[in-house]
Image: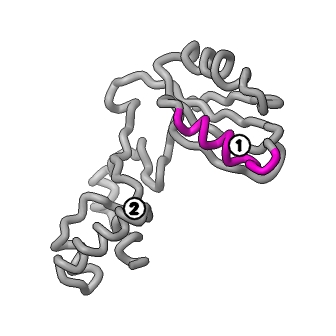
Amino acid sequence: MEMLLKLLSEDARLSLEQLASLTGLSETEVAERMDELEKEGVIAGYQAVVNWERAGLEKVQSIIEVRISPKRDFGFDEFADTVARFPEVENVYLMSGGYDISITIHGASFRDIAMFVAKRLSPMESVLSTATHFVLRTYKERGIILNEKPEDERSLASL
């Protein structure tokens, strides 16, 4: 199972035939295991890594550090669950260190993100403070280098 998950996390477009060949399972066994893993919530979804800059589509990404006062008997879970349901929120992580929750959001503009923080996040009862960081450029996402320049074939000829 671990090998199947590793392969899918690296390239979710692999065919059943390819996955079967790489894992030593039959295509039927691969399909059945994938179905089980999806039903159990182990595989939560399949997504493409998009280089928005190359696509020519402007998106503003922000990482927001949040310090909260967790509610008794709920810890951080209730806050995280509420924030995770906002459509602009991409990621929500419980953190160690100087703040409690890390939130990654996307917006069409800096103003969209500022309004999210001012109108939706900061007024929440348990929020003590926020610090917003804007992503200026993404070099690598989910293990994929996004702005890699193609190798110059002339440099390969000299080897």
Region of the chain picked out in magenta, as a range? 72-85
Disc 1 or 2, which lies upstream in sequence? Answer: 2
Q: Position of residue 85 (x, y in %)?
A: 52, 36
Q: Amino acid at mark 1?
A: Ile
Question: Which residue is farthest front?
Answer: 73
| Residue 42 relative to residue 102: left or right | left
158 in the magenta segment: no
Residue 82, picture quadrant = top right
Residue 65, picture quadrant = top right
Label 1 environment density (alpha carbons within 10 Å; few <14, some 14–19, many ≥20): many
Number of marks in picture: 2
Name the element at disc 1: strand
Q: Position of residue 47 (x, y in %)?
A: 35, 48
Label 2 environment density (alpha carbons within 10 Å; few <14, some 14–19, many ≥20): some
Q: Amino acid at mark 2?
A: Ile
Which residue is at 67% across, 33% downward? 64
Which residue is at 37% across, 45% downward? 49
76 in the magenta segment: yes
* Image quadrant where one finds the C terminus: bottom left
Residue 124, picture quadrant = top right
Which residue is at 44% across, 50% downward? 145
- Seen in the picture, residue 127 relative to 115 is either above or below; the reply is below
- Seen in the picture, residue 2 relative to 103 is either above or below; the reply is below
Residue 43's disc number? 2
Which residue is at 50% across, 23% downward? 107
The residue beneath circle 1 is 101
| Residue 148 relative to residue 15: left or right | right
**Circles 1 and 2 in contact, beta carbons < 8 Å:** no
- Estimate the spatial distance between the alpha carbons at disc 1 and disc 2, rounded to whole Å: 23 Å
In this view, the residue in front, 17 or 94, is: 94
